[in-house]
Structure formats: structure tokens, C-alpha cells
Amino acid sequence: ARRPRIFSGVKPTGHLTLGNYLGAVRRWVEEDQYRADALFSVVDLHALTVDHDPARVRRLTRQAATLLLASGLDPEHCTVYVQSHVDEHTRLSYLMECTAADGEMRRMIQYKEKTAREWERGGSVRLSLLTYPALMAADILAFDTDEVPVGDDQVQHVELARDLAQRFNQRYGPVFTVPRATRPPVAARVMDLQDPLSKMGKSHAETAGIVYLLDETDVVRKKIMRAVTDSGTDVVYDPVQRPGVANLLDVLASCTGDKPEVLAEQFTSYGALKGAVAEAVLELLRPVRARHAELCADPSYVDGVLRAGAERARGLARPRVDAAYAAVGL
Ligand code: ADP
């Protein structure tokens, strides 16, 4: 049997966060790249769905790619590339727009949340924000993907990609592999440290509630020590009643591999818990930051990885996208 094909990505809309790392990147590094034929992409086209500064997108794309390598993605084992370097994504995206229904796009939770936020600010919403899941479906389906390792917030979009693959296959014949989402056992949704009811999001405005992979040691420690908990004192794992404490326990559990319920019993104060979380997170990030600094000093290495990655991705995607064009009558 062939090894499973895995595809996943990260959008360069901000600096990578602890949420991205625990929810997605870490699994790509530790498991997915070794057990599967895996492709990981910095999906820069998705960064254009909202207002953006071109120079910043370019900088963040480079930084995200460098951080993926610094986190341990190994080009000997997987393919790392930038989405806009591979035209097949946009070619297939159009066919996905012709497969999806307007209503199912409008029902996407992220679309509803982001448009609500935008309208509140009196801004307008780009059409591409609505069609974003069609491009994401194209990203996934172009590679005969079996599994898409993501955090909780992306599961709905992967399910849509699954629906579109099935619908397309029914209409036009068996062109696409039908993918499924996989989620991490803990920390599938890391919450904002200052607002434990909303997710820690890279695309949000920068606040003390968001830990970035490139934050300095003392900044990470300070953010975690100041995390919002509640007025109680006993450490219990209760995501509904005690979301702040549960979030800290989830982060620690993800770092140590223990169960959050079990960890809760080991602490008698919030201060001690926060101290342990801070040290565990710093331990995890230290090698990533060191490797990132090394890679920044060697830009031609990163260029080479991305060039080779784009070439391989193009080669894999082209026959599948050509087959899809032929199937619809073009
Ligand atoms: P963001 O929402 O931070 O801009 P992306 O959409 O680029 O992140 O997502 C990259 C990956 O990180 C996805 O698999 C997503 O599900 C995951 N992810 C993003 N935020 C979190 C979070 N707070 N907790 C867990 N996983 C997350």
C-alpha cells in the first residue's frame, strides 16, 4: 500500500503562535513527515483575503517558511513550499468554486466571525474571504491528500473539501481522493491567555494573550505568568467553568505528553502551574529559536528548499489538476 499523503499549511497573516505550533506544526514535525508523504505550504494567497501590507506579507511568508524548517521539518523527509509558487492551486480553485454552493460557503464559521468583525469596524469584506475554503479545498485535493492535520478551527474547512471532492467525483467521475482532517489529542484549540474564550490567533492584533514562537524568553515568561485564570485557587481541569486554567493545563499536557486531568492534581496554586507552563513552553521553543537564527544567516539554503519544494509540488499537482479540467469538459 502507498504511504498516506498528507497536506497542511499555515497562512502568513502574522507571526506564528504557540497555538499554531501545538495545534499543527509540532505534529507535522514529530510524526507526519516520517510516516507519510507529506507536503507543507506557506499559503500566502490566503493572506490576501484581508487588508494587508505587501512588504509585510512577503516578510511573514519568508519567516513562516524559515520557522517551519527551524521547527524541524526536514526537506529530506517532506516537501516545504510557498503556495503562490505553484499555479495549480489557483487553477483548481476555480473548479472548486464551480463545485461549491454559495450557501455552504456562507455557512462557514470563520467567514461569519470574520465578516461580523469587519462590519463592526465599518469595513468591507473581500469576495475572496467568502471563497477562501474553495482555494483551501483546491490546496488539499491537488495532491491526492488522505489526511489534513489541523487544529480545531480548520476542521470545518477540511470537511467542506471532503464534500466537494465527493460531489465532484459524483458529477464527473473519480478524479479526487477524499481527504479527512486529523486533530491533535490535546491543545487542538489553544486559547488566548488574556481572553480564554477566544482562540490564540496569529491574525489577531498582537496582545499579551498571544505567545509567538519568536518571543524573547522573558516575554514568554511574562505573558504566561500574567495569564487570566479566575478567582478560585484550586487547580482543577474544567474547560467550561475554568477555561483559563484548563487552557494552561492543555498547553502543559501538550508539552509533557501527560493528561491535563492528571497534571491538575500536581499543582496546589495557579502561580506554580503558570511557572511550570512557562518553563515547559520555553524548553520547547528554545531549539526552534536557535535554529531560526541559524537559518536566517543562511538565506540561500532556505531559497533552495523552497525552490525544490515548489518544483515537486507542481509535478505532483499538475496531472491531477489536468485530469480535473478534462473531467469537466475543458
Ligand atoms: P491562524 O488562525 O493563527 O492565522 P492558520 O489559519 O494559519 O492560523 O492555521 C495554521 C494551523 O494552525 C492550522 O492547522 C490551524 O488549525 C492551527 N491553529 C491556529 N490557531 C490555533 C490555536 N489557537 N490552537 C490550535 N491550533 C491552531
Image (spheres, rainbow, N blue to C red):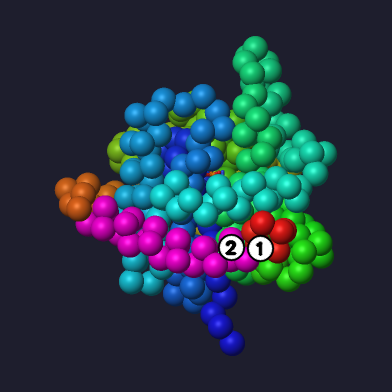
User: Residue 29's x, y, as percent?
Assistant: 43, 64
Residue at the far top in the pictured view: 122
The answer to which of 46 and 94 lies nearer the viewer is: 94
228 versus 277 height, above or below: above
- Could you say which quadrant of the image residue 103 lies in? top right
Classified by dominant secondary structure, the portion drawn in magenta counts as helix
Residue 311, magenta (yes or no): yes
Left or right side of 52 for 169: right
Q: Is residue 37 visible?
A: yes
- Specify start and end residues of the magenta stretch as a single range: 301-323
* Label 2 packing within 10 angstroms: few (<14), some (14-19), many (20+): some
Which residue, given by chain and number where applicable, does mark 2 sit on? 322
Which residue, given by chain and number where applicable, does mark 1 sit on? 326
- Could you say which quadrant of the image residue 105 lies in? top right
Rendered-image quadrant of the C terminus: bottom right
Q: Residue at x 46, y 42 (%)?
A: 44
User: Residue 76's x, y, as percent?
Assistant: 33, 71
* Label 1 packing within 10 angstroms: few (<14), some (14-19), many (20+): few
Left or right side of 236 for 74: left
